[in-house]
Image (tube, rainbow, N blue to C red):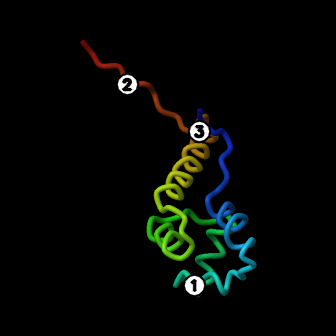
Amino acid sequence: MRMYNPPHPGVFLKEEVIEPLKLTITTASRILGVTRPALSKLLNGRASLSPEMALRFEKAFGLKMDTLLRMQTSYDIAQARKAANKIKVERYAARA
């Protein structure tokens, strides 16, 4: 069953990992070895989760990289479907 409005993986990470552990973005960025602005953009849903960042979360917090990247893909698909009516493409019909 397709999820029509999946959460952004960054928002999920913020609400399910960072906040429950009472970590600041600055502390979490140090743990992950990334810049504070990069992590902030992800956690606030303004940047996509990259495979590298997913691996960093897996190594630091035990979340599976594959699961996080599937979340990103689901989110991306849902966003593309929302914008589908703005994409104008004619259906291809092969000539006999």
Q: Which residue is mark 1?
A: 31
What kind of element bears circle 3?
A: helix
Q: Residues within 10 Å of mark 3 (few under 14, many from 20)?
A: few
Q: Residues within 10 Å of mark 1 (few under 14, many from 20)?
A: some
- Kind of residue sitting beneath label 2: Tyr
Which residue is drawn at the image coordinates 69% and 73% (left, top)?
18
* Viewer-nearest residue: 21 or 88: 21
On screen, residue 53 versus residue 37, left or right, reads: left
Which residue is drawn at the image coordinates 62% and 83% (left, top)?
36
On screen, residue 48 versus residue 7, left or right, reads: left
Residue at the extreme top:
96
Residue at the extreme front:
62
Which residue is drawn at the image coordinates 30% and 19% (left, top)?
94
Question: Tag on residue 81?
Answer: 3
How far apart, in angstroms, are the residues tagged by discs 3 and 2? Answer: 20 Å
Tag nearer the camera, 1 or 3: 1
Where is residue 8? Give x, y as percent.
64, 56
Q: Which residue is mark 2?
A: 92
Tag nearer the camera, 1 or 2: 1
* Label located before the other in sequence (3 or 2): 3
What kind of element bears circle 1?
A: helix
Q: Quadrant of the C terminus?
A: top left
Label pair 1/3, CB-CB below 8 angstroms: no
Q: Quadrant of residue 41?
A: bottom right
Where is residue 64? Give x, y as percent.
50, 61
Is 77 located above or below residue 62 in the figure? Answer: above
How far apart, in angstroms, are the residues tagged by discs 1 and 2? Answer: 50 Å
- Kind of residue sitting beneath label 3: Arg
